[in-house]
Amino acid sequence: MARMLERFRLRRLAFGTCLAALVVGVSAAPAAAVPASADRPQTQSVYDAQWPLRGANVQRVWTTTKGQGIRVAVIDSGVDASHPDLVGRVTGGGDFANGASGDGTQDVVAPEGHGTEVASLIAGTGKNFDGDGLLGLAPEAKILAYGVYEDGQPDPSAVAKAVRAAVADGAQIILTPSSSVMARPAVLAAVRDALESDAVVVSGVDGGAGSTAGTTTGPAVMTRRIELPGVVTVAAVDRNGKVWSAPEPGTRVALAAPGVDVLAASTDDRYWAGSDSSFAASWVAGAAALVRAAHPGWTAVQTIEKLIDTARPSGTGCTDDCGYGVVDPLKAVSDTTKPAAKTNPLLSATGPRQETATRSVRTAVDPERIMFFVVSAAAALMLYVAVTTVFIRRQRSPGD
């Protein structure tokens, strides 16, 4: 999958120290650490480096839920269960490839550890460095780790077996590898069973590294159409809502989420800052865990419907590449209206943009276009008044 990463070693933090500015397009200025509190449990330097959390106003989200009791399956390169930010949150589900990850609790991707990264963005506890580590969106969720990597890449047959194992292990959310791996008959069959078992299945979308919205070129771009019925496919956006990498041509995108210049935990107490659609998928998986924890009686279908209905309209740099919009965890958790959906909206034959036009909670016209129409209408009205006034004056006699 297309991804860009830059590693840096995060040294032990203490009050009065600061975090060096992140690289790979992010330049977070160092800030002095502040005492932990109910309002800000992290030191300011680490917390401020996690821009997706700050932008989502997670402190308000966490007054309702932190994802307690929800099982999230991470089907990837394995998860380093010994990382301080993940200790106590990871359970091994097994390795279905060559066994290199043991029971799934060892990460076979060196040196950054891909499965560890995505797991930390879901359930990182922030316990590293005496409580100054990295937090996930749903820090009290449980990670079920499954290894599926063979020769540095996810093996489709192993992915299919892991999906079925995750269902048997009671996973309510299943985070899978990227869309190109998922579009295999064996995997799709396993996913159908998972959907029927009331699991939310989430996957990042592949694209050309560094490509922009609307383009169809790049080293990872493929020509075949990617259809993953029922799967919450996710595109990565930056802090301005601009899509990072255009999806493969024909790929249907359900939602978008933060996935650019994101800080994630890695192996050996390290952290990486980088861009990856899997990071965005992790964010959506975490949001789904929060919704299911806040509303334990809701089904997977209702959870997906709520994420769609509360998604923010995408920015001008996103357009059709962001599906229904950018996921909003706070709105998704705060909106307690129970969705009426009985069937998965992502099984529909129409794409998100077609359905969006019929949803009262969304608008198909962006603010710039609305402003254009308003200004044009006002100008037309002024011109009409001016012409009418001149016409009336010419019709009046001098005596009048």
Image (cartoon, rainbow, N blue to C red):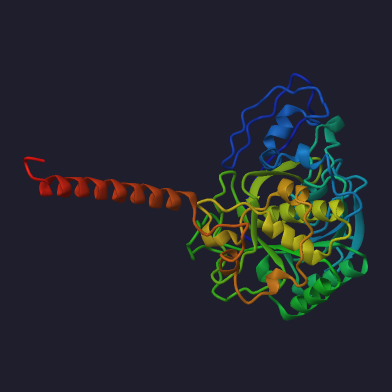
Q: With respect to residue 348, does 391 lie above or below?
A: above
Look at 59% across and 66% down and name the residue there. Answer: 358
Looking at the image, which residue sits at the far top? 16
Q: Quadrant of residue 350?
A: bottom right
Tell me: 166 left or right of 31: right
Residue 33: which quarter of the image?
A: top right
In the picture, measured across the screen, residue 60 lies left or right of residue 106, that is left
Q: Is residue 99 left or right of residue 237?
A: right
Residue 152 shows up from this direction = no
Residue 397: percent from left, percent from top: 8, 45
Q: Position of residue 18 (x, y in %)?
A: 70, 25
Residue at the spot 67% in from the left edge and 68% down from the top edge:
179
Residue 203 spot, x, y in % from top left: 71, 63
Q: Is residue 213 visible?
A: yes
* Residue at left offset 79%, top offset 59%: 338
Viewport quadrant of the N terminus: bottom right
Q: Residue sitting at 86 percent across and 58 percent down?
A: 145
